[in-house]
Image (tube, helix red, strand yellow):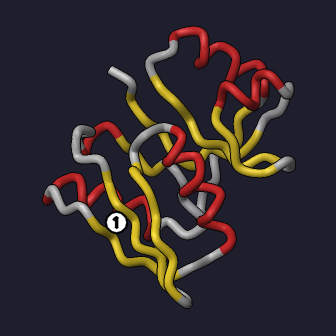
Amino acid sequence: MDTNLINLIKLNLIYKKKIIKYRYNKKNINIIKILILLNIIKYIKKNNNLIYLYINNFYKHNYINNLYKPSRPLFLKNSIIKKLTIKKKWIFLLSTNKGIMTNFEAVKKNLGGMLLLKIDTN
């Protein structure tokens, strides 16, 4: 996973910029689709090898935390994900063998995975 995308989104939320210019990558498209569903990204425009992401600025920068570290990946079992989803304080993005999904989808499909991103809902 390319962590630059998440860090760029977080920086744009800090400086209240609305547009991110980013290179097109198939791995990041799944993350972008989920962030659109979570209403963090308004919409995208695609040119050749670039993507323009338009950000909703009503989120604060400390609501999004990048938890992915290539040197020390954090894997969560389905039982731990179930305990964390009961509280409904956070939304996690997980990389599973079925693709990138939120913790709610992972509980429905009974999957565990590697933790990528945490979003506070409060």
70 or 2, nearer to the observer: 2
Where is residue 60 shown, x and y percent of the image?
22, 40
58 or 13, nearer to the observer: 58
Tell which residue pokes out farthest to the left in this image.
15
Left or right: residue 110 versus residue 103 is right
| Residue, disc 1 | 8
Q: In which quarter of the image is residue 19?
A: bottom left
- The total number of labels drawn is 1
Which residue shows up at 49% across the image and 37% down it?
Answer: 38
Helix, strand or loop for disc 1 = helix
Where's the N terminus, which quadrant?
Answer: bottom right
Where is residue 117 shown, x and y percent of the image?
51, 45
Where is residue 50 shown, x and y percent of the image?
48, 83
Note whether 78 is above or below 32 in the view shown: above
Where's the C terminus, which quadrant?
Answer: top left
Left or right: residue 10 versus residue 82 is left
Which residue shows up at 23% across the image and 39% down it?
Answer: 58
Where is residue 91 shown, x and y percent of the image?
52, 30
Note whether 1 is above or below 109 in the view shown: below
Tell which residue pokes out farthest to the bottom in this image.
48
Within 10 Å of disc 1 (Cα), the crowding (few <14, some 14-19, many 20+) is some
Which residue shows up at 39% across the image and 24% down it?
Answer: 121
Which residue shows up at 44% across the image and 51% down it?
Answer: 66
Note whether 9 is above or below 100 in the view shown: below
Kind of residue at disc 1: Leu
